[in-house]
Image (cartoon, rainbow, N blue to C red):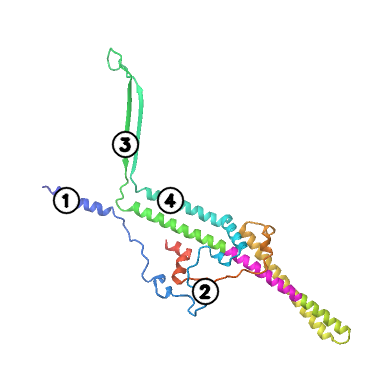
Amino acid sequence: MSRAAYALPFALTALLAACSAVGPDYRVPEEAVALQVAAQKPFDLAGNERVEQAPLPDDWWQLYDDPTLDQLVSEALIGNADVRQAYHNLRRAYEGFQMAHHAQEVVVGGNGSVARGQLSSEALALEEKLPVMNLADAGLSIGYQLDLFGQLHRAAEAAGADADASAALLDTARITAVAGVVRSYMMACHASEELTIAKHSLAIQLRQLDVAERLFEGGRGNEVDVARARAQLEALRAEVPPFEAKKAAALYQLAALLGRTPGALPETVTACSHAPQLRQAIPLGDGTALLKRRPDIRAAER
């Protein structure tokens, strides 16, 4: 047997080894915070009844059990420009992953044709006329791109990681939009409640001023009591405009998040006088769950 015959198995082995993907595979570091024992403990070690270690649901805003808030969040998720842009980026990244994945597949193709014709007898130097014949042609092709150094495999992995990162960025856009709507709605309800309390206090102080003035006119009061009541009235009156401005700012911000004008908000929003309250313990989870549900960390990891 020649030396070339002995060298052939070694050459094939080296060629197959070169086909494996190069570079290290990603692994979560052992010293990562999410893997530590401390990260798997509850946030509140004092046994607070207002929180629990249950996982946070995706539709966490429904924990408030407020139909108006649910409607506002649904509208924001449909019409928010950042959410739509992140969704289209995810679709584009997924299409790139599909293209990179299909690049490693075997491509099988085929073609065929059928015709009916008659050859020229003169071209073949024949005296007799040739009969009409059926002519058929068929072909089969098989193609495969050899991934010698794992380039296609790594490209598919990278495209998959990009798609995962785009999905995390979509979650970021959704969380940002939902949190903005919930925060603005809560601020508007709180401001409305504070405004109601301020106006009620103003009405009470106005009656006290009237009583002080009547007592002074009847000779049973003095100017100091009247001046003190009037000063307190003006102080309470000065507290009303900031609450009105706070509520207006919250409504303007909410309208901007929904793509509406401030006057086009539902009546239930402007009439909200009490902010919704949670009817159950807040599901915080542990440190590991918090890190896993943070989309910015997931995007950076991918």
What residue sits right under mark 4 in the picture?
96
Identify the main secondary structure in magenta.
helix
201 left or right, relative to 299:
right
Between marks 3 and 4, how big is the CA–CA gap?
Answer: 28 Å
- Check residue 140 in the rendering and tell me which mark sits there, or answer none: 3
Q: How would you rate the neighbour count of disc 1 (Cα within 10 Å): few for under 14, some for 14-19, many for 20 or more?
A: few
Which residue in the structure is indicated by mark 2? 51
Foreground residue among 53 and 1: 53
User: Does residue 47 show up magenta in the picture?
Assistant: no
- Front-lying residue, 187 or 26: 187
* Residue at disc 1, secondary structure: helix
User: Do tag 1 and tag 2 residues touch (Cβ < 8 Å)?
Assistant: no
**Local SS, label 4:** helix
Residue 217 lies, in percent from the top left, at 88, 83
Residue 186 part of the magenta segment: yes
Which of the 4 quarters of the picture holds residue 234? bottom right
The alpha-carbon separation of the residues under discs 4 and 2 comes to 42 Å
Camera-near label (3 vs 2) is 2
Numbered label attached to residue 258? none
Residue contact between numbered discs 3 and 1, judged by CB atoms under 8 Å: no
Residue indicated by mark 1: 7
Q: Check disc 2 and give the amino acid type.
A: Val
